[in-house]
């Protein structure tokens, strides 16, 4: 599932590897610097946060305010549905 993180007017598309109420783990080509404030968007969820770590093509984001548990479940269910339809096996559902 694709997520977009935006920092300093630059948008970064990334694969959403894991999602919780308090943050996300992403895989992509480029990310903001560790410590940069950002906006995270996946599906209809938008959350302010900060980049807490970057390691090569992966990064971790902590949300300023936890997102609703129902939103986490909805995104995971949607990602699982998309994977089943496409035959891909991703890391998000679980």
Image (tube, rainbow, N blue to C red):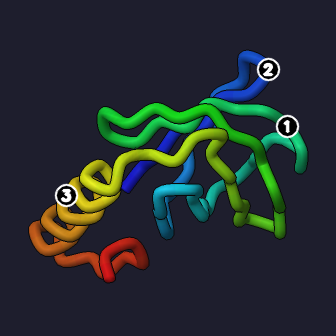
**Spatial separation of the CA atoms under disc 2 and disc 1:** 9 Å
Decide: marks 2, 3 in contact (CB < 8 A)?
no
Q: Secondary structure at mark 1?
A: loop
**Relative horizontal placement of residue 47, taking residue 59 as reference (left or right):** left
**Spatial separation of the CA atoms under disc 2 and disc 3:** 29 Å
Would you call the spot at circle 3 few (<14 residues within 10 Å), some (14-19), or many (20 or more)? some
**Relative horizontal placement of residue 7, taking residue 82 as reference (left or right):** right
- Residue 78 circle label: 3
- Residue at 60% across, 64% down: 25
Q: Which residue position holds label 1?
A: 36
Q: Quadrant of residue 11?
A: top right
Name the residue nearer the viewer: 50 or 54: 50
Q: Secondary structure at mark 3?
A: helix
Decide: marks 2, 1 in contact (CB < 8 A)?
yes
Would you call the spot at circle 1 few (<14 residues within 10 Å), some (14-19), or many (20 or more)? some
Mark 2 or mark 1: name the one nearer the start of the chain.
Answer: 2
Q: Which residue position holds label 2?
A: 8
Percent coordinates x, y for residue 59 in the rendering: 72, 61
């Amino acid at each position: 599932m694709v997520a977009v993180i935006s920092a300093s007017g630059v948008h970064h598309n990334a694969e959403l590897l894991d999602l919780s109420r308090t943050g996300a783990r992403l895989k992509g080509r480029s990310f903001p610097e560790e410590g940069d404030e950002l906006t995270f968007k996946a599906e209809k969820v938008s959350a302010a946060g900060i980049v807490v770590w970057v390691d090569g093509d992966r990064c971790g984001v902590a949300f300023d305010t936890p997102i609703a548990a129902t939103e986490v479940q909805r995104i995971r269910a949607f990602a699982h549905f998309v994977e089943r339809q496409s035959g891909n096996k991703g890391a998000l559902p679980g």
